[in-house]
Image (cartoon, rainbow, N blue to C red):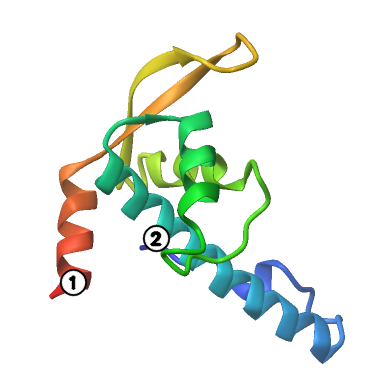
Amino acid sequence: MAELEAQTLARATDPATSHEAAEAVVANLTELRLAVLQLVSIYGASSSSRINRLYQAHRHARSWPHAAPDSPRKRAGWLAYPAHGLLEVVGRAKGPNGVGESVYAVTDKGRAYLEARAA
């Protein structure tokens, strides 16, 4: 999985504590992306709001990192970028607020990634 670079979150002129914090954020985001990929793999094609709900419901049992309530759907969007291709948008659904939202499913590349991690 492509990694977010810590140096993009902290400027060269920032103090060491900012660089340490940036590295922690990168590690958390990577765990969160993996958790979202696993979630969609386990529960099947899911809308953005369903991903958010499922993540919060299963976070503790699966030892997934803490995340803001809307963060999992944003990670799903990142995983679906063509450059990453681990999830794909397979449709649209009406969200709880009546606005359309993406429905994501795991791609063959995403399944292969998870299988390689499990091996």
Q: x, y percentage for residue 70?
A: 64, 41
Q: Secondary structure at mark 1?
A: helix
Task: Name which residue lies at 81% across and 90% down.
Answer: 16
- Please tell me whether mark 2 sits on a helix, a strand or a loop: helix
The answer to whether 109 is drawn above or below residue 107 in the figure is below
Q: Residue at x 45, y 57 (%)?
A: 33
Left or right: where 15 falls relative to 67: right
Residue bearing the label numbered 2: 34
Pinpoint residue 1: horizontal percent, then vertical percent.
36, 63
Q: Quadrant of the C terminus?
A: bottom left
Q: Nearer the viewer, residue 76 or 66?
A: 66
How many tags in the picture?
Answer: 2
The extreme bottom residue here reads 16
The amino acid type found where label 2 is placed reads Leu
Query: At 51% across and 63% down in the image, what residue appears?
Result: 60
99 is higher (above) or lower (below) than 55: above
Q: Which image quarter: residue 13? A: bottom right
Q: Are marks 1 and 2 in contact (CB under 8 Å)?
A: no
**Are there few (<14), some (14-19), or many (20+) residues within 10 Å of tag 1?**
few
Residue 16 higher or lower than 107, as above or below: below
Give the residue pinned by disc 1: 118
Counting residues from the start of the chain, the first of labels 1 and 2 encountered is 2
Categorize mark 2 by other alpha carbons within 10 Å: few (<14), some (14-19), many (20+). some
Q: Position of residue 96 (x, y in %)?
A: 59, 17
Q: Could you tell whether 36 is left or right of 41 in the image?
A: right
Disc 1 to disc 2, how far (Cα)?
A: 12 Å
In-front residue for pair 3/106: 106
Q: Amino acid at mark 1?
A: Ala
